[in-house]
Amino acid sequence: MQSGSITPILRIFDVDLARSFYLEFLGFQLDWQHQFEDNFPLYLQISKDDCIIHLSEHFGDASPHSAIRIYWEHIYELHSELSQKDYKFSKAQVEKTDWETLELSITDPFSNRIIFWADA
């Protein structure tokens, strides 16, 4: 039996704020976006390396305050990359957990938590 990858959907409320956080700060790229008409909610796909995330302004697609875990092999390189950026809302650090992982937990402007992790 073969399994596929998972694509989480995170709720957003402000596209400009989402772009600032996900594209400029975290370094994801915008793959595509969809909007049924002007003044309708926007739905976006972003990616970085093999990681794909969907962001949605649509009311029923996801709940705010969600959390996702993303395996990131070179977590200290990611931390270094993010630390060099002047983003005043996040100064996250890599922490070693009791369950032997290294975690870099960052909360987006919409209260969604993104936890990048690697084996310790």
Image: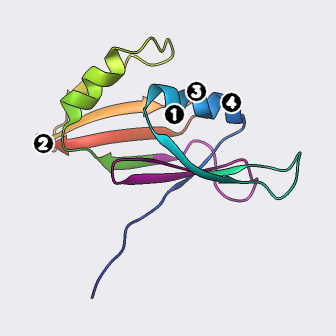
Look at discs 2 and 3 and give the one toward the viewer.
3
Residue drawn 43% across and 48% down? 68
Q: Nearer the viewer, residue 44 or 88?
A: 44
Is residue 66 rendered magenta in the image?
Answer: yes
Q: Amino acid type of disc 2?
A: Glu
Give the residue type at disc 4.
Asp
Label 2 crowd bin: few (<14), some (14–19), many (20+), radius 10 Å: few
Q: Residue at x 50, y 27 (%)?
A: 24
The residue tagged 1 is 23
Element under disc 1: helix
Is label 4 in contact with label 3 (beta carbons under 8 Å)?
yes
Q: Is residue 37 magenta?
A: no
Q: Marks 2 and 3, Cα distance to the nearest angstrom?
A: 32 Å
Which of 80 and 108 lies nearest the eye of the viewer?
Answer: 80
Q: Quadrant of residue 94?
A: top left
For label 4, the residue is: 16
Callout 3 secondary element: helix
Q: Report x, y in % for residue 58.
A: 75, 53
Instruction: Answer with the quarter of the image where residue 96 lies.
Output: top left
Circle 4 SS class: helix
Q: Amino acid at mark 1?
A: Leu
Residue 26 placement (x, y as % from top left): 43, 31
Residue 100, numbered label: 2
Residue 20 image label:
3
Q: In the picture, which quadrant includes the C terminus?
A: top left
Upstream in the sequence, badge 2 or badge 3? 3
Q: Residue at x 89, y 45 (%)?
A: 39
- The answer to whether residue 8 is above or below residue 17 is below
Asked if the residue under mark 3 is in contact with the one under mark 2, i.e. CB atoms within 8 Å, the reply is no
Look at the picture and state if 36 lies above or below 65. below
Mark 3 surroundings: few (<14), some (14-19) or many (≥20) residues within 10 A:
some
